[in-house]
Image (cartoon, rainbow, N blue to C red):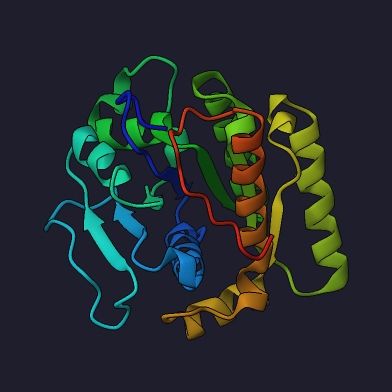
Amino acid sequence: MSTKPGTWNGLLIGVAGGRKAGSSLLAKCLAEDLASDASNRGLVLLADIAAAGADQAPSQDRPHMVARAHVRTEDDLEDLMGGYRFVIADIGTDISGFVGIEPTGAAQGAPLAMAALRLSDLIVVVGTADTRSLNSLVQTIETLDGLVGADRVLPVVNRLPRGFKRRLAAVFETVRLLASSSAFAAGDPVLITEGDTVQLDARAGPTPPWSLVRPLSSEVRLRLATALRIGGTTTTSVPSSFAGD
């Protein structure tokens, strides 16, 4: 959601999560899945917000997309949004520790991550199925509700237990925590089992297995398409492509 008026702007999807939540892996798989659509070739960028370093560079094994761009400033990020249909911002950290309505305290040390959150058309917040991570996930969504609105947040619970009873208990606890706070406005979470996460990690490549990426990718496409239809974003003249809805 670029603030520069009168320009062509792509869609920015922020992805963040706590330690070992798998947010960077999911950001990578999401970018690769979007880029695997022929109509998006060359129009998908994975921007590394968490790391400083070199400017954008084409991937050696994924010529259809720019695999990484290390972004230093908010202007850099907005410039990238002017050149790509989808920019996936890998924020790659537990944002519950520094996100606030006012940029004070620890937030002062993460201005680029804060800018990415404010500019994002959709923020994917990843947690795991343990109680501590779920509570952090809910706290983060509550805070983002005050910063950008919970309707721009997509919760993801990663690494759900494989066993039926344990998985059912984790899903119940997730729903209970989300429903008991303002985080419920973010809608139903995307649920990814531990087995799917292991397979994604092992098989991540130019085109991750669609059956494994589908829960996240389909919901992201649906949320963005819905936001564009109802005018929920300020994106200007985006040539949208939501194949696989």
Total numbered circles: 0
- Near-viewer residue (5 or 102): 5
Is residue 113 left or right of 241 when viewed as pictured? left
Looking at the image, the residue that sits furthest to the top is 102
Q: Is residue 19 left or right of residue 242?
A: left
Residue 93 or 36: which is nearer the viewer? 36
What's the residue at 75%, 37% (across, down)? 177
Please report the residue visible at 31 percent of the width from the left and 27 percent of the height from the top: 106
Query: Does residue 71 sit above or below 67 in this rendering?
Result: above
Tell me if residue 98 can be seen.
Answer: no
**Relative horizontal placement of residue 82, taking residue 38 as reference (left or right):** left
The image quadrant that residue 134 belongs to is top right
Query: Quarter of the image containing the C terminus?
Result: bottom right
Say which of 222 and 28 sits in front: 222
- Give the vertical position of 36 relative to 124 (above or below): below
Q: In which quarter of the image is residue 54?
A: bottom left
Q: Is residue 188 above or below residue 219?
A: above
Q: Residue at x 31, y 21 (%)?
A: 105
In this view, the residue in front, 40 or 94, is 40
Q: Which x, y percent locates residue 31? A: 44, 63
Query: Measured from the top left, where is residue 5 in percent x and y?
Result: 32, 23
Whether residue 123 appears in this view of the structure is: yes
Q: In which quarter of the image is the N terminus?
A: top left
Left/right of residue 103 with respect to residue 144 in the rendered view: left
Q: Position of residue 95 (x, y in %)?
A: 43, 38
- Give percent across and percent down for residue 64: 34, 74
Question: Which residue corresponds to the image point at 33% horizontal and 19% vertical from the top-left?
Answer: 103
